[in-house]
């Protein structure tokens, strides 16, 4: 029998999941914007360049969310489970796969999972480092 979340806990878990997903999506453009105007790239900070970079970031996120998540990922359902390992399990269920093709799918699944774990490890570290960098700019005490 499958464990189901109680009704009061479901909204809290939904909000937490959305916070994780959109928190990561929301912080990445900040780093991209900062890096775009780094002195080594030689791009001057003016209205045209800032609006151009913001437009690129906005439309990239819109296309990724629209195409990847809505049209591909949301359709992949492994008995209510999602994610890279669910995609791996769904692909391995196909009939007539050769052992070489199965091994390729398994390797791609593990690579995808390792990229996910790497992102989960490095994003908080970058956020903390950015916050500390902001504090050192705001005051000389740090």
Image (spheres, helix red, strand yellow):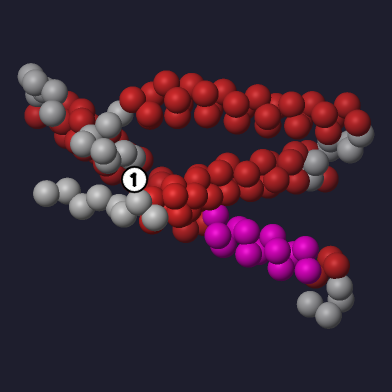
Q: Position of residue 73 (x, y in %)?
A: 38, 29
Q: Is residue 41 left or right of residue 24?
A: right
Query: On the image, numbered disc 1 is attached to which residue?
Result: 113
Q: Position of residue 68 (x, y in %)?
A: 45, 26
Would you identify the image quadrant in which residue 49 lies?
Answer: top right
- Answer yes or no: is residue 40 visible: no
Quarter of the figure that contains the C terminus: bottom right
Would you identify the image quadrant in which residue 43 lies?
Answer: top right
Q: Is residue 41 above or below residue 69?
A: below
Main secondary structure along the magenta-highlighted residues:
helix
- The residue drawn where x is 25% and y is 50% is 4
Q: Is residue 61 left or right of residue 139?
A: left
Residues 95 and 102: in front is 95
Would you identify the image quadrant in which residue 54 lies?
Answer: top right
- The residue drawn where x is 48% and y is 21% is 67
Q: Crowding at label 1, few (<14), some or many (≥20) Cα neighbours within 10 Å?
A: some
The magenta stretch spans residue 15: no
Q: Position of residue 77 (x, y in %)?
A: 27, 31
Q: Is residue 71 above or below residue 2?
A: above
Q: Which residues are magenta?
A: 123-135
Residue at the extreme right of the image, as rendered: 46
The magenta stretch spans residue 130: yes
User: How many numbered callouts?
Assistant: 1
Query: Which SS class for mark 1?
Result: helix
Q: Is residue 120 above or below residue 75?
A: below
- The residue drawn where x is 13% and y is 23% is 94
- The residue drawn where x is 57% and y is 23% is 63
Q: Is residue 64 left or right of residue 102?
A: right
Q: Position of residue 71 (x, y in %)?
A: 42, 21
Residues 137 and 59: in front is 59
Residues 107 and 128: in front is 128
- Answer yes or no: is residue 126 visible: yes
């Amino acid at each position: 029998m499958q464990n189901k979340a109680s009704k009061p806990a479901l909204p809290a878990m939904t909000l937490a999941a959305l916070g994780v997903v959109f928190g990561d999506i929301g912080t990445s453009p900040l780093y991209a914007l900062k890096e775009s105007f780094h002195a080594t790239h030689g791009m001057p900070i003016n209205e045209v360049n800032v609006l151009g970079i913001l437009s690129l970031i906005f439309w990239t996120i819109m296309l990724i969310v629209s195409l990847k998540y809505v049209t591909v990922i949301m359709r992949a359902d492994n008995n209510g489970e999602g994610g890279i390992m669910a995609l791996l399990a769904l692909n391995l269920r196909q009939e007539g796969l050769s052992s070489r093709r199965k091994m390729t799918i398994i390797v791609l699944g593990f690579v995808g999972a390792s990229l996910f774990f790497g992102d989960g490890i490095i994003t908080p570290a970058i956020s903390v480092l950015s916050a500390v960098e902001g504090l050192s700019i705001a005051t000389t005490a740090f």
